[in-house]
Image (spheres, rainbow, N blue to C red):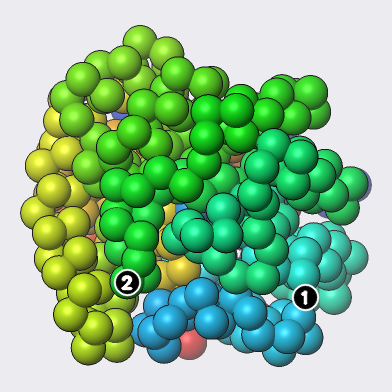
Amino acid sequence: MSAYVVKTKALIDGTGSEPILGGMFRVEDEKIVAVGKELSTDGAEVIDLSEYTVMPGLIDCHTHLSIVPAEGNQLAQMRLPAGRNVLRSLPNIQKELESGVTTMRIMGEEHHIDVDIRRGIEEGLIVGPRLNISGHGIVASNGHGVGITTSDGEVEVRKNIRSNFAAGTDFVKMFMTGGMSSTRPPVDFCGFSREEVRAAVEEANRMRTYVAAHAHGGPGVDMCIEEGVRSIEHGALMTDEQIARAVEKDMWVVGTFSITFHPTGIEQTDFSNPAIKAKVLKGREKTAETFGKIFKAGMNYGLGTDSMHGLIAFEMECAVRFGATNMEAIKAVTGNAAKLLMMEDEVGTIENGKWADFIAVEGDPLADIRAMASVKKVFKGGKLVVNKVNA
């Protein structure tokens, strides 16, 4: 049995509790077995992180493996051959790890490359975060998000969802509305009928999981609220009424700010398309306003880079700028994020029985959220997978 005790300058456990100054925890066989202020080492090795703030490994709640927004035309990227997109995914995975992300929620890939890459990580062929996957996105043929696979009508929706589950996926990703990165359809367009959404939710419920819906606003969000979708992805155009109804139903929303706000996102290439540029500029204004209301209303939320790999710290910085507290932003990528993924028994907090996924951060992110860009060490399953000290 391998065992060690970790010493910290301050321990943020991901639950929202106040940090434990000088906190310690014990790791045995990849799991956390004890947490406290003073722990006996019992002859175990000591990992001295007493110069750092230590917290759970971060969870990127909305991203892809193979897409690089700065290259433009994201939908064409999804249509590349499977082998090429597997190779394109490898540097993206490394960027996520180096930013402190130890769990990634993958929001749609063609050819089921998310299934194969997860298997490769689990088998030790490559080093990467834990993957929570959705397989082929469920998208109408005239909707935003069309790669190769389309789902028109209740029968195709059910068939494609069942095919995903047969391959080993964890949840359903459905493209309900238009998006920012495509010329058509409009952002508030709704691609599915009520019957199709109801069928998707029924198939997910049957597998004891859920539907996560790409949805910015309009009737698509209304349908998500009314038909039992668990999470609204993006949500930039949600109205006050929609936010209130979503709170009543204990729903989630995932903010994805980097792709529209960061200069290496959509604007780097796709701003050459006037229609996309207009969408993004309007989207920026509405996103800041909408998420300020979401935070104030107390809606459940997570944060995701949406393929802006390595920029989870920027997501947190934006959340704070829009009205979240520093601790709330931290919970959105740790403890609360794990609840969204239905993985709260495995990851997201430094507590007994959880996987020993944790990071060492230089500085104090509770005083300055920008410290989250200074992740120095990353451990996954108790093993050091990133070390930037003296690099």
Q: Which residue is mark 1?
A: 126
| Residue 265 point in image, percent of width and height | 30, 76
Residue 269 lies left or right of residue 108; in this view the side is left
- Residue at (40, 78) in percent of width and height: 69
- Residue at (63, 55) in percent of width and height: 137
Residue 242 lies left or right of residue 106; in this view the side is left
CA separation, marks 2 and 1? 36 Å
Q: In the rendered view, would you say 216 is above or below 145?
A: above
| Residue 384 point in image, percent of width and height | 65, 66
Q: Which of the pair 390/73 is nearer the observer?
A: 73
- Quarter residue 376 falls in: bottom left
- Quarter residue 354 falls in: top right
Q: Which residue type carries mark 2?
A: Thr
| Residue 161 point in image, percent of width and height | 75, 44
**Numbered tag placed on residue 183 in the rendering:** 2
Q: Earlier in the sequence, mark 2 or mark 1?
A: 1
Q: Which residue type carries mark 1?
A: Ile
Circle 2: element type: loop
- Quarter residue 270 falls in: bottom left
Task: Rate crowding at label 2 as few (under 14), some (14 to 19) or many (20 or more) other CA atoms within 10 Å.
Answer: some
Q: In the rendered view, would you say 252 is above or below 212?
A: above
| Residue 227 point in image, percent of width and height | 52, 21
Circle 1: element type: loop
- Residue at (9, 54) in percent of width and height: 285
